[in-house]
Amino acid sequence: MTQRRVPYLILAPGLILLILFLVLPLISTIFPTFFNGGFTFSNYTSFFLDEYNFGIFWRTIKISLIATLICVVLGVPTAYYISQSPKKWRGLLMSITLFPLLTNSVVRSFAWITILGQDGILNNALMNIGLLSKPLTMLYTEFAIVIGSVYLFLPLMVITLVGILENIDSEIMEAAETLGANRLIAFVKVILPLSVPGIIVGSILVFTGSLTAYTTPQLLGGNRNIMLATFLYQNATALGNWQGASVIALIMIVATLIVMKLFSWVAGRMDKRGEASA
Amino acid sequence: MSYVELKDIRVSYDNKANILKDLNLSIEKGELVSLLGPSGCGKTTTLRVIAGLIEPNDGEFLVDTQNLTKVPVHKREFGMVFQSYALFPHLTIKENVAFGLKLRKEKKNSIEKKVKDILAITGLEELGDRYPKQLSGGQRQRVALARALVIEPKLLLLDEPLSNLDAKLRLAMRIEIKRIQRQLGITSVFVTHDQEECFSISDRVAVMNKGVIEQFDTPEEIYNNPKTEFVARFIGFENFFELTPTEEWNYKAIDGTVFHSTRDWEPGKHTGTIRPDDIEITRNSKQTENNMVSGIIKVRTFLGKSYQYEVETPIGKLLANKTDDVVYQVGDEVTLSMPSHKLIIV
Amino acid sequence: MRKNIGLKIFAGLVFAFLLVPLFIIIVTSFGTNSTIQFPIKGFTLDWYSKVFDNEAFMDSFFLSLQVAFFATLLALIIGVPAAYSLARHKVFGRNWIKSFFLSPTIVPGLVVGYAMYQFIVIKFQFPIIQGLFLGHFLICLPYVIRVVGSTIEQLDFSIEEVSWTLGCTKLQAFIKVVLPNITSGIFASFMLAFINSFNNIPVSQFLSGPGVTMLPTSLMNYIEYNYDPSVSALSVILMLGTIVLMYVIEKTLGLASIS
């Protein structure tokens, strides 16, 4: 009898702390958004019906989607390259990928401020070689947020994919080649389909990361390109609209969950290797 | 000129140590040739050079008088069966087999027919719509074979294809491979480290060691007449002893015993060798005749169908197997005689 | 022997994309001009001494270290036994409990901080520092559960059974046999949790007040009003920290273990 209770006693402290400091705070913050006299969804319907609010929501989705796509396009070949490199190089290449990931995201966004700014490195360089006559506005645009997000999350995508690609038997690629596929065709027909699970996991990380990112839009987006996270912060602090902030909080949580479920569902549909159904 | 020609092939990964050095090999049309040797001998490298997965540093590779040395792997049109089978896990068996045909842009019904035919030949008709994960090891092996064969390759390459199967299945599959190879008359190169497997399946065998071919002959010839000490050791000659040539067909061991051989050996060879099975054991006769040495039994091992004795003799330790009812004890003095037609000089 | 130039160039450009921005920061930290320039004019280390003279930076740096360290420590104390229990014991609703332990990763960091601030600081009047500590504990816990959990699952269960047959109690077996064999997992999860806590911004964003500001937040606030190379200098110092940590991880566990 006492033996059976042991696991629950071990798990209890963690569960209690999680309930006290995660679940209860979330409930107490979000619960009131459903009440306005009686139970209502009006806070949420009015959020999405408001053009300005919906614009922010749509911008967040759009930027996250674009950043995810770019991460896939840049990440898959890079990860394949790393996974095919000799052992001694692979460690170095992985370090190059990991280094930005472990560097503070403020530092990483700051780097792009210095590059994309009005008087930044890119503008100066382009003007010096005569491609531009006056500086382009690149900082504080959606473009800057996309670049910043890709920079933030590309390492995550690459590392996830390397894990998957390393486990693909190298003889499979060779088998495709002996059957008459050149490198590119073999990559598209064999390696790409097999890396779908990795692409999905990586995409979930990048998409939900961009969706809820605070630092990047705050530093690179400026006041005109607000995203959900910065909007939440603005509501809670500058505008003192706690209700509004809590509504955004739930929207971010739900959006994250939907994205994860959706992507996993897609992964399930595309990964038809039929392990279970013999 | 043979159908397949490897000429002075050299492969080196760092330009210091050679994996293959000046390797020459000729294979006739329709032949099944095995590359046999211990791991690291270069047999897989040779196969990969043929496949085009490794580009040799020097040398030429020709098939049907065409020089293919620089032709990339996907244009060579050879079928290859990999050790791991390398089936595409995301494709069904049919799709796996059709992969090469689709790349050749063949017509849809032609692909369907060819896939159906090859699945029939390899006994996979029922499994076409399954995925590789759902198949047993032997079935995957057949798929790998079907996929390689369906493109009607000029050459079939098999890289230790049976090493992942259990003993019983291995036996069945090697008969199967031989049957299909004969039926389709396809020139094949088979890599293995298993001597028995290799002898049973091959028309000719190239025994390799440290990047060179030590001997290239029919299985019978290699079994009976190994040309070098390495080949002899590899195929089960466990007794080796120093000899000095005296007169024609006669040799003298270090204790003075005269060994007579029934054959003429290349000059310069001076190591006698014989299989443990070919040595005859008798109680010590104290006689000193040609081809006989006496010694004391040091170790006796039961092998099932026979006993193996390790005998200390003046010319060295010798192993002899004996099936007779007479069982000797450790410490017994015995005489070993080596029939002159079984004695090999390498 | 068989190369693919196109792929090589593509990967090279991606690596350049990853490294060049950080390289630019390093260079700009040495410029003499009072705003950031590239290429730089002159060479100076003044911006580094400016960083060390900046009390706000130094205070928040030590606060970040402390919060990250103690939050990780608490996560280990609570998480390691929990991970063990989830891996080895028959627990009702095991997968649900495990997902629950990992749930702080699903809730966006800013929301965690926001809810914590509302509930703990506003409603129950806890000091901000306690909310900060608990918030960081929440983001550390999933790393411990995941990394230590998978280490325990890979550990041969029979070595525990052997220790029982030799007379160990369950607790003794855990301490004498299990713990020594999962040190690498514990260390890896410590490193991961510590780095993520130290670098985290969203959770701390709401949970800051007078004298209670974490280093990344402090740096972010500074950037909003200043554009001088001391930001670069501080960034370089943080990167050096990252390099030291990566070196330590590589030497002890191998970087592969945390990626």
Image: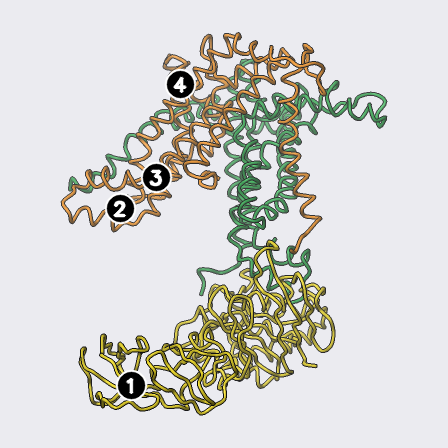
For image coordinates 39% across by 72% down, the residue present is B166
Q: Secondary structure at mark 3?
A: helix
Indicate the amino acid at tag 2: Lys
Q: Tell me how far mark 4 sits from mark 1, CA to CA.
A: 83 Å
Task: Say whether mark 3 and mark 1 are on the same chain.
Answer: no
Supply the letter of whichever chain is green. Answer: A
Residue A158, image x, y percentages: 57, 41
Q: Tell me how far mark 4 sits from mark 3, CA to CA.
A: 29 Å
Q: What subunit carries mark 4? A: C
Q: Which residue is mark 3?
A: C97
Task: Say whether mark 1 and mark 4 are on the same chain.
Answer: no
Choose the circle earlier in sequence order: 3 or 2. 2
Indicate the amino acid at tag 3: Ile
User: How is the structure coloured here?
Assistant: by chain
Disc 3 crowd, CA 10 A, few/some/many (<14, 14-19, 20+): some
Supply the letter of whichever chain is yellow. Answer: B
Nearer the observer: mark 2 or 1; the answer is 1
Indicate the amino acid at tag 4: Gln
Q: Give yes or no for contact between labels 2 and 4 (Cβ–Cβ under 8 Å).
A: no
Nearer to the camera, B12 or A192: B12
Indicate the amino acid at tag 1: Leu
